[in-house]
Amino acid sequence: MPNWSTSRPGAERVPSVPVRWHAASKVVIAPPGATDHAGPPAVPEATIASTRLLIPTLSGRFGDETRGGRRFDAMPGLHLALAEPIMVDAHLTLQDETELVCEVPVPAVEAAVVLKAYAWSDRWAQTTRDTIDLSNLFHILDAHGAEAVGGWSLHHEGTTGARGDASRILLSLAMKLRARRAAAPAIDTRKLEVLIRRWVRA
């Protein structure tokens, strides 16, 4: 089983991750206060079909925000993922077989759970993908413990902000799982309900 110990700047790193990159589209995450001038180096237009720029919002809801005269997709909980990401050494193989090695920031487990909780709340009736992702994340948390995955605070009562929203959303998911209203055939829904109730308080 992979070592899921987190790695922040200046600390130990997580293992390298092989990735095959298909440049059909891209999603760019911008830090708070970013404008249309922010972003990674330009990619040839011929390789990009579309671009979505995500920015954090503290509203607790998905929506659009205008900054610098441009409209961006706003995602709740994203500020947590940007604040303390895990740095992964990724080995990329492009479609022309060019190999690249780069650092990729990814959310820690708690931040990923918060993001997925918001996503599930927004579209749970349309897809089971978020439920499956949450199941995987909770199994990682339960198998390795809070310290090994970079910390966990959703088990504290009275949590506020994005974490508080996520706690309430997750407990709502647990209720729907018990009532068989959020079925995901690929997972053990009873086990996910147990894990949510074990690790989350509102």
Image (cartoon, rainbow, N blue to C red):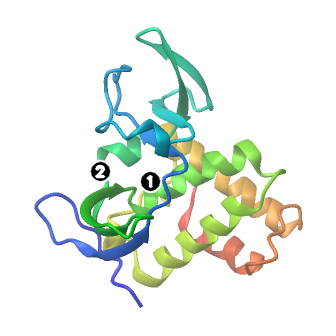
Q: Amino acid at mark 1?
A: Ala
- Look at 71% across and 71% down and name the residue there: 193
- Secondary structure of the residue carrying tag 1 is helix
Identity of the residue furthest to the top in this view? 69
- Secondary structure of the residue carrying tag 2 is loop
Query: Which comes before the other along the chain, label 1 or label 2?
Result: 2
Task: Tell me which corner region of the image, top left, top right, bottom left or bottom right, holds residue 12.
Answer: bottom left
Q: Position of residue 191 (x, y in %)?
A: 69, 80
Q: Position of residue 109 (x, y in %)?
A: 43, 63
Tag count in the figure? Answer: 2
Q: Quadrant of the N terminus?
A: bottom left
Q: In front here: 130 or 99?
A: 99
- Look at 38% across and 20% down and name the residue there: 36
Task: Tell me which corner region of the image, top left, top right, bottom left or bottom right, holds residue 164.
Answer: top right
Q: Position of residue 127 (x, y in %)?
A: 78, 56
Q: In front here: 18 or 56?
A: 18
Q: Position of residue 62 (x, y in %)?
A: 62, 32
- Look at 89% across and 68% down and name the residue there: 180
Disc 2: which residue? 84
Q: Mark 1 packing: few (<14 Cα in 10 Å), some, or many (20+)?
A: many
Contact (Cβ within 8 Å) of mark 1 with mark 2? yes
Disc 1: which residue? 111
In the rendered image, the vertical position of residue 178 relative to residue 114, given as above or below: below
Identity of the residue furthest to the left in this view? 10
- Looking at the image, residue 157 sits to the left or right of residue 30; the answer is right
Can residue 166 be spotted in the picture? yes
Q: In front here: 155 or 66?
A: 66
In whole angstroms, how far apart are the C-alphas of marks 1 and 2?
Answer: 9 Å
- Looking at the image, residue 158 sits to the left or right of residue 42; the answer is right
